[in-house]
Image: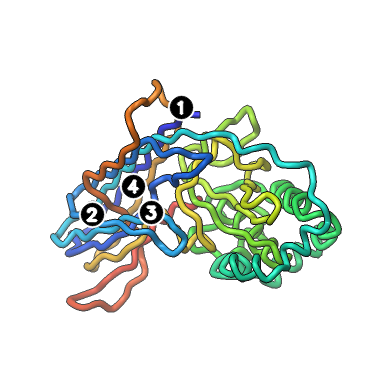
Amino acid sequence: MLLEIRHVTQYHYAEPVRESVMEVWMQPQKGARQRLVSFDLELDPPAQLFSYADAFGNAVYHFDVPQPHDRLNIVARSAVETQASPPLPDALDMGEWDRLRSDFVRGEHFDFLHHHGFAVETEALRAFAAERRLDELKARDPLTAVRALSRTIYESFSYETGVTHADSPIDLALEARSGVCQDFAHIMIAICRSWGVPARYVSGYLFTDREAGDRSDPDATHAWVEVFLPSVRWIGLDPTNNVEACERHIAAAVGRDYDDVPPSRGVYKGDAESQLAVGVSVRRARAALTEPEFIRVAQPAFARGGRRRAGAGGLAYDQQQQQQQ
């Protein structure tokens, strides 16, 4: 499937700010199931762009806008060719639990086995697990268990924006029994890790199909979960839509939780309120793209909005894109 993604982020400041320093995690990954055909970043106002690979292998772009400005616009355009993952078996043998406990798995995937940030085990999470008798799932093989867990989260929570925010702990979604993709991913990750199953957060996009039952917002970024099982390696599960990750899922970055891979993060200097507008569109490409893979960065940008910090030369505000996934 050949897909085009357009991700627009716009910040408006009530008063001109003196400087913005930003990072973005918006470039789709390259892999066996996902070919990056093109990637283009444009920034207004313009700035020099740098890039690096973070600790999890994600492409990160960063830049500095050193002059006063009252707006910051980023447009990220991508073209990606995706393929369906090879079909998974119906089940694995029970020895997979022993393989998960091996020193190799526990050492190789240390970061994805321990609670971190938003994906933590809380009293509310333990109460939810007891209510839904989730520990009984461990009597099944790990593949069957994680599939059943994803389905249970889908059935237990309604998809509703505005209930939680980008920095909300999972307890808010657990109490309300509603939330968005980010909340459901964190809940599933925390439970998988408590079982000894490595699990990581995937930030990206979804080509939404309402006829297939998708309930996530087609105009927003998306998030789902990947779990590691030694016999089948990393597999993607989408508890928001009760599906396995497929050719409609476009992965941009992976981390321990949302805070590792927000679409954008940075700081600005100035004592001004900011407003954020975000728009995402994912559609089928209108024609086949035959040119070789390229990455062109014209300008970059992005942000968060709101925590005041003391900074040299004035006030600095942490900025991170507040749109939930």
The residue under label 1 is: 284
Q: Nearer the viewer, mark 4 or mark 3?
A: 3
Dot 2 lies on which element? strand
Tell me: residue 294, above or below residue 187. above
Which residue is at a point 81% across and 63% down the rendered structure image? 135
Q: Amino acid at mark 2?
A: Leu
Q: Which residue is mark 3?
A: 59
Q: Secondary structure at mark 1?
A: strand
Query: 258 or 127: nearer the eye?
Result: 258
Q: Could you tell me which secondary element the residue under label 4 belongs to? A: strand
**Mark 4, residue position:** 9
Q: CA distance from mark 4 to mark 3?
A: 18 Å
| Quarter of the figure with residue 83 | top right
Residue 70, position in %: x, y?
20, 55
Q: Nearer the viewer, residue 21 or 228?
A: 228
Q: Which structural element holds mark 3?
A: strand
- Disc nearer the start of the sequence (2/4): 4
Residue situated in front as seen by the camera: 31 or 165 = 31
Q: Amino acid at mark 3?
A: Ala
User: Which badge, 4 or 1, is on the more N-terminal residue?
Assistant: 4
Q: Mark 1 packing: few (<14 Cα in 10 Å), some, or many (20+)?
A: some
x and y percentages locating residue 289 in the rendered image? 37, 26
Q: Are marks 4 and 3 in contact (CB under 8 Å)?
A: no
Tell me residue 150's x, y (percent).
70, 50
Spatial separation of the CA atoms under disc 2 and disc 4: 17 Å
Q: Is residue 279 left or right of residue 118?
A: left
Mark 3 or mark 4, which is nearer the start of the sequence? 4
> Which label belongs to residue 49?
2
N-terminal of the pair, mark 3 or mark 1, is 3
Residue 139 image position (x, y, % from top left): 86, 59
- Is 299 left or right of 9, judged from the image as shown? left
Q: Identify which amino acid the numbered label 1 is placed on.
A: Arg
